[in-house]
Image (spheres, rainbow, N blue to C red):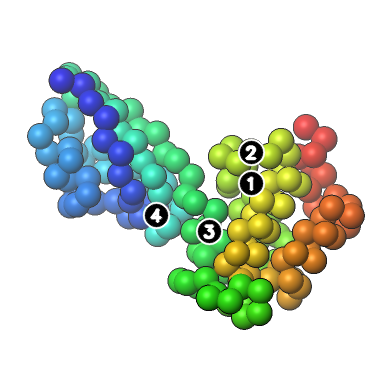
Amino acid sequence: MAGTIEVLVPGGQANPGPPLGPELGPTPVDVQAVVSQINEETAAFDGTEVPVTVEYDDDGSFTIEVGVPPTAELVKDEAGFDTGSGEPQENFVADLTVEQVKQIADQKHSDLLSYDLKNAAKEVVGTCTSLGVTIEGENPREFKQRIDDGEYDDVFAAEAEA
C-alpha cells in the first residue's frame, strides 16, 4: 500500500504532530526520520510555509520532495510583514533591496516561467506590486521599467548569460 502525502510545513520546524503525524501514523515509515529529513531539506526557508510531498513504500522506505513557497510568502518573509496592502498602489507596507529581489528570484526561479534571473526578478517585482511593496524606496512598476531599460543588467548578468 504505497502512497503519497502532501502537506505544508514551516521550513525547518516540522514536527511529528499535525499535519504530518496523523498522515504518517498509519504508514510503515519512521515518522521521526521523515520529520528529520524534512527539517534538513527545508532549513533554508526558516519558518515559511513550504509544500512537501512524501512518497512511501510498503517496506517503510520514503522519498521527500520539497517545493518552493509561493512568491508572496517569500516576499513577506524577506520584507518582514504579515499582510499586503489593501491599497497597493497608494499604501506601501514594506521595502526590499535589489539584493533581496535577486535572492527571492534565485529561490523561485525553478518554479517560475522565466528563462533567466532578470525575468524571474520581474515576476517577483510583479508580486511586490500586488502586495504594496516598494523596491529601494521606488514604486515597483517604475523599478520594473528600470529593469527593462537595462539599469540592473549587471546585478542579473551572471544568470542572463547562461
* Mark 2 nearby-residue class (10 Å; few <14, some 14–19, many ≥20): few
Query: Is residue 83 depicted above or below 1 in this figure?
Result: below
Q: Which mark is residue 148?
A: none
* Residue occupying image coordinates x 40% and y 59%: 47
Element type at mark 4: strand
Residue carrying label 4: 49
50 sits left or right of 154 in the view: left
Where is residue 15? Give x, y as percent.
24, 51
Q: CA distance from mark 1 to mark 2?
A: 13 Å
Specify which label sits upstream in the sequence, 1 or 3.
3
Q: Which amino acid type is marked by label 3? A: Ala
Depth check: 59 or 117 in front?
Answer: 117
Is residue 36 in view? Answer: no
Q: CA distance from mark 2 to mark 3?
A: 16 Å
Residue carrying label 2: 113
Pointer 1 with pointer 3, Cβ within 8 A: no
Q: CA distance from mark 4 to mark 1?
A: 18 Å
Specify which label sits upstream in the sequence, 3 or 4.
4
Depth check: 29 or 74 in front?
Answer: 74
Q: Quadrant of residue 10?
A: bottom left
Specify which label sits upstream in the sequence, 4 or 1.
4
Specify which label sits upstream in the sequence, 2 or 4.
4
Pointer 3 with pointer 4, Cβ within 8 A: no
